[in-house]
Image: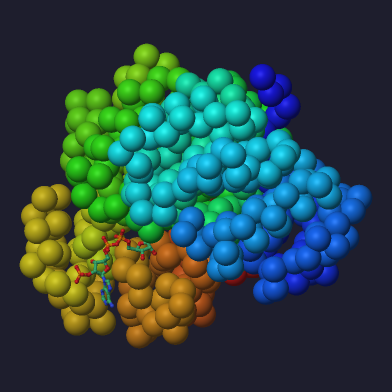
Amino acid sequence: MDHAPTRLICPLTATSLEAMRAEMDAAAKLGADMVECRLDHLVEPPSAGQIEVLLASPALPVIATCRPTRQGGLYRCDESSRLAILQCAAASGADFIDVEDDVPDSDWPVGQIILSHHDFVGVPDDLDGIAARLERSRAVVNKVAFTAAGPEDALRALDLLRVCRKPTISLAMGECGLASRILARKFGAFGTFAALGEGAGSAPGQPTTKEMRHLYHWDRLGPATAVYGVIGCPVAHSMSPAIHNAAFEAAGLDAVYLPLRIEPGHDSFSRFMDAALARGWLGLRGLSVTIPHKENALAYVGPANCGDLAGTIGAINTVTVGADGRLRGDNTDYSAAIDALRSSMDIACADLAGRSVAVLGAGGASRAIVAALAHYGARVTIYNRTVRRGQELARDFGCKSAGLEAIGGLDAEIVINCTPLGMHPNMEASPLERIPKSVRVVFDTIYNPVRTRLLRAAEAEGCLCVSGLEMFVNQAVAQFEIWTARKAPRDLMRGVVAQRLAAGE
Ligand code: NAP
């Protein structure tokens, strides 16, 4: 049995021996525990002498791999020369040799063998049978890698870690499989792969070593780590993992927060939720939900199990999973927006009663904000490009509505932009050409950029300006407090988002 913590394995994919050797040193500096020399990536098949030089006094333990094209690798020459390269690597001191499970046992190099099975299309039908075959072999480490269509497939990879008795690498490739790579440590895998840098991975969906260490706090992960995540599509550029993982670390909580890409549709959403909740051992405790799944989340959790206004809004962005598996839903979007507005204006919610508000847009964000404004008695007019959609929203909450072309004549104290006009990368757009005289407060829900063209124009007119950054931070703060029953490190969370925005991430 292998009791070492799960190794962060950095695949080295340079095309020359000198560059691969330099990558080895770089991987050690980044904090990798092991490297995988992908000898199939070298432009020329290496000679015995070259392999010896490459593997002389390595900075880290080495896995030697020479993946053939039939198994998704780059090695094109004949099988006997490939096996000879691996034998040379073993003789030159490679700690482990990766051999594919279609190579007869009698042809294996002499050394510590990682027996690997890959599926670049999907999840093998006979996953359990494959794992059992690897277990029965004389290899010292099992490796199974397949392709995930949804994050529920990542959970299949974790299932294998729980049943295999030998040290095992089990992971789901592709963006949807990311959870299997990060949670490998929680479930005691032999190792997980993390790339040297952006674009340097050896398989789809590999995070970088830097992300593993600094975004997911790899060293802090263990068997008791609670699991949180954000469900959405797309989700790869979400700021939520950065903000929540930083908050968990600052609060000293044993928890990790993952991006979970789920394709649109209630079926995809339910498939993941059913799979995650059936695995109590996963330790799933909470989910943020973003476009396009907020309505699906409400339907799945059930309005009866959701906080006030969630049913009226028709969407939730927060799911809490109790230790007994019970679900609770909340919508922290509307309170986040209203808190951003009223704290900037230095008023209480009740002081919104009777104030005239123009809301631009009639989508999901608008619906949450209009529901809350109506709840507190504000007089709301919705301006939307698609007039019918604006009318429907206005009807649901007893407001007025008009087309976007009527916007120039608006007569309101507060303007709230809930359209993407002005959002990165179209930062020169604005929903309002000039700020009408009646307007005293402008709230732009866009947070990238923080100072939109609309806010700059409002500032020039002496209006009070509220940025979408405050709303974004507020909803994350509220989620943290719902999940942990602790006060959130707000300043730190705000700083993480501001820093990432400034860095253009
Ligand atoms: P959504 O459901 O897709 O709604 C988008 C709304 O904008 C619709 O009313 C749409 O009008 C209108 N719109 C889109 N493109 C337009 C254009 N070119 N010209 C005029 N109107 C246009 O999106 P959402 O979830 O409500 O998000 C809207 C914005 O809110 C986002 O862009 C984001 O910046 C912001 N937001 C911020 C936060 C935060 O935490 N700060 C959270 C959520 C959202 P039609 O009905 O005619 O299509």
Say which of 26 and 480 sits in front. Answer: 26
Q: Residue furthest right?
A: 57
**Colour treatment of the image:** rainbow
163 over 59 or under it: above or below = above
Residue 358 picture quarter? bottom left
Q: Position of residue 228 (x, y in %)?
A: 48, 35
Q: Residue furthest top?
A: 324
Q: Position of residue 58 (x, y in %)?
A: 86, 51
Residue ID at (20%, 30%): 302
Residue 246 placement, left or right of 369 = right
Say which of 253 and 338 sits in front. Answer: 253
Residue ID at (19%, 82%): 405
The reply to whether residue 2 is in sight is: yes
Residue 335 placement, left or right of 2 = left
Residue ID at (32%, 20%): 326
Residue 87 placement, left or right of 76 = right
Q: Position of residue 489 (x, y in %)?
A: 62, 38
The reply to whether residue 501 is in sight is: no
Residue ID at (61%, 32%): 139
Q: Position of residue 69 (x, y in %)?
A: 50, 63
Say which of 411 and 269 sits in front. Answer: 269
Query: Which quadrant of the frame does ligand 1 lie within?
Result: bottom left
335 over 221 or under it: above or below = below
Report the number of numbered marks: 0
Q: Quadrant of the N terminus?
A: top right
Q: Quadrant of the C terminus?
A: bottom right
